[in-house]
Amino acid sequence: MPTQPIDVVLATTYRCNARCIMCNIWQNPSENDLTPEEYRFLPSSLRYVNISGGEPFLRDDIPEIVAVVKERAPNAQIIISSNGFMPGKIEKLMKEVLKVDPTVGVGISIDGKGETHNHVRGIPKGFDKCMDTLTRLKGLGMTNLRLAFTVVDDNVEELPLVYKLTKELGVEFSMAVAQNSSHYFKTDQNNFSGIDLLKKNLGPMVEDLLKTSTPKNWLRAFFAHGVFRYAAGEGRPFVCNAASDFFFVDPGGDIYPCNIMERVLGNVRKDSFENIWASHQAEKIRGEVRACELRCWMVCTARTDMKRHAGQVGSWIMKNKTAAHLGNFELELPSGTGEQPKGGNGKPQPKGDNGADADKTKGSDDGLHVLNDAPPPNKPSQPSA
Ligand code: SF4
Ligand code: SF4
């Protein structure tokens, strides 16, 4: 029997009202998205469900989708990832969502302060709209809120500003580097080249997290360090468990191992999830995942890997926490021994080309904040390495 999954990203629509420079979903809208009832296939083993898009709040039935998710996976933490550009509608829908499950969180993409965010997301006054959305959600009593920063060359220097903003606002912070994906972001044009700037701007944040007395923050520091190493061409430190711990569902019901790999396990409109998950095709794809040369580092697959490799994570934290307190912490540069990751479309990438849209890894989130409190992952049916 295969491992039962604990983490999923549901791309509930590929309609989007943003015009982001690192994602072409908005140019390729979906039709005939899964209905709330069609999400009844979700397995009860799930512990994290990221409701994503496109822009999920373009759907009027998000409360109904949350209700089905809650019924099918009652122990799951649900996070909705949004670009935050519809303050009034998001507030209205979240009022209904919170009646279904008051613990639901919302992540809002923020890729810089003011004009930088507006430029990256392609929406005039977008930053102000996002702040309005955040204020309204706080007004509903929500505390499970975060800002998700997607690093591109155009905004890498604003990473510290947004991190500082999250501290001022009292919300969580998550990050990723813009990702290529043919089936999801529908682009192979993300070619991040600012590794030195990333090191300069990310290092103080990682150091700050390590200096706190909060274990959650130490895990976030490890994750952020992984983002840097991956951006620098090192690749993920652990073998990937996509299609075992995690899966991705597109708006039409196709099941993928992750946001990036262009392989379909099956479609829930044509077969039961149980059959798809136990199929020969799924097992074949699990083999491809274990050999995946992309070696990306996204929270949706990194989270459970970090649990599996708690010893390695713990020793990195101890070593670097000490360095941070002694004032000699530095983000490690890649050893140069790692294999070069390849682009999300399977093509080899130049050094530093990688990442994930933070509002998708959410999960992508989704995001650093969900690294904590994870239940132990299921024992894999096959060795993970
Ligand atoms: S990154 Fe998100 S907000 Fe931007 S176009 Fe893609 S789906 Fe829309
Ligand atoms: S390494 Fe990345 S692209 Fe490859 S299977 Fe894992 S999550 Fe997917």
Image (cartoon, rainbow, N blue to C red):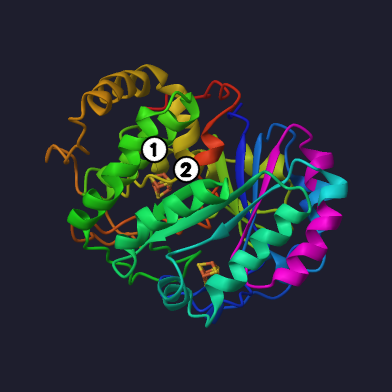
Task: Examine the image and state in which quarter residue 93 appears.
Answer: bottom right
- The residue type indicated by label 1 comes to Phe
Q: Which residues are magenta?
A: 69-97
Residue under pointer 2: 299
Tell me: residue 307, above or below residue 44: above
Q: Are marks 2 and 1 in contact (CB under 8 Å)?
A: yes
Q: Nearer the viewer, residue 149 or 212?
A: 212
Residue under pointer 1: 223
Position of the C terminus, as image quadrant, is top left
Say which residue appears at 68% left-offset and 60% top-offset. Answer: 135
From the top left corner, tell me how far across and down residue 299 is, in percent: 47, 43
Asked whether mark 2 lies closer than 8 Å to ligand 2, one says no
- Report the Cα–Cα distance between label 2 and label 1: 8 Å
- The residue type indicated by label 2 comes to Val
Count of numbered circles on the image: 2
Say which residue appears at 27% left-offset and 52% top-offset. Answer: 201
Tell me: residue 351, above or below residue 282: below
Q: Is residue 83 magenta?
A: yes
From the top left corner, tell me how far across and down residue 1 is, in percent: 61, 26
First in sequence, mark 2 or 1: give its number: 1
Say which residue appears at 50% left-offset and 31% top-offset. Answer: 304
Tell me: residue 127, above or below residue 179: below
Give the residue at the far front of this rendering: 168
Q: Is residue 253 left or right of residue 297?
A: right
From the top left corner, tell me how far across and down residue 47 is, in percent: 66, 34
Question: Can the viewer see residue 347 in this picture?
Answer: yes
Give the residue at the far left of this rendering: 336
